[in-house]
Image (cartoon, rainbow, N blue to C red):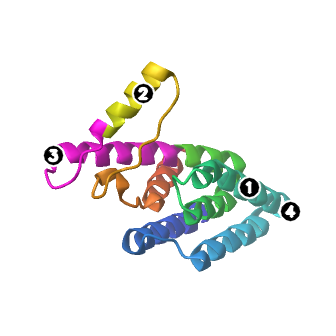
Amino acid sequence: MLYAICLMLVVCAAAWDLRQRRIPNRLVLAGAAIGLLLQGALAGPSGVLAALYGLLVGLAILMPGYLMGFTGAGDAKLMAAVGTFLGPLGALQAGLASILVGGAIGIGFAASALFNKSSVSPWSRYGLMLKTLSVTGKPLYIAPQEGEVMGRKFPFAVSIAIGTTGWMIWI
């Protein structure tokens, strides 16, 4: 039952993120509240504690990405809500799976520039950043150009939905 409701949460969030490029706070807060309540009803005080730890782990796993501007606040809050359903270990594993899925999708976005002549390719920018790193030993970030495929806003809730669903199937 926990997994079914969690799956509904991540699918709704992914659909919303695809359409609006944001995840509503009401959806995330309702998901977290339901996760806490269900854990409490099914496992008592230890379930509530596991849900709270899961919330903290889920938030912590995407917080660095949010602070560096790689993900949005809604993504971090969604992963925290997912943590209330999965507990701390599940939140960690599903979060790592989501990051891997997001990386694969990002590589797919970058590779699509090789085949789509209308988008600006990021590969020369990546090459310059790599060359600077290898010559100077210091990383250099060059922002994406206007129209570059990697400059588009990425709906990371899709990665969270796929990663979390994959984790549920794997377990």
Q: Quadrant of the C terminus?
A: top right
Residue at the far bottom in the pictured view? 26
Which of the two marks, 2 or 4, is nearer to us in this view?
Answer: 2
Please tell me whether mark 2 sits on a helix, a strand or a loop: helix
Locate residue 93 relative to residue 7 in the image: left or right: right
Q: Which residue position is annotated with label 2?
A: 132
Residue 137, x across and y down, in percent: 51, 22
Classed neighbour count for the residue bearing mark 2: other residues with Cα under 10 Å, few (<14), some (14–19), many (≥20): some
Q: Which residues are magenta?
A: 97-124
What residue type is disc 1 on?
A: Leu
Please tell me whether mark 3 sits on a helix, a strand or a loop: helix
Locate residue 123 relative to residue 32 in the image: left or right: left
Q: Nearer the viewer, residue 136 or 57?
A: 136
What residue type is disc 4 on?
A: Pro
Q: Of helix, strand and loop, which mostly describes the magenta segment?
A: helix
Mark sitting earlier along the chain (3/2): 3
Residue at the far right in the pictured view? 45
Q: Which residue position is annotated with label 4?
A: 45
Residue 167, x across and y down, in percent: 52, 47
Locate residue 155 relative to residue 118 in the image: left or right: right
Q: Which residue lies at the image location 28% right of the left edge and 37% below the top edge?
A: 124
Q: Which residue lies at the image location 48% right of the left edge and 22% below the top edge?
A: 136
Q: Nearer the viewer, residue 17 or 70?
A: 70
Q: Which residue position is annotated with label 1?
A: 56
Residue 24 quadrant = bottom right
Mark sitting earlier along the chain (2/4): 4
Mark sitting earlier along the chain (1/4): 4
Residue 103, x across and y down, in percent: 42, 43
Does 26 appear in magenta?
no
Q: Which residue position is annotated with label 3?
A: 115
Residue at the far front in the pictured view? 136
Instruction: Tell me how many marks there are.
Output: 4
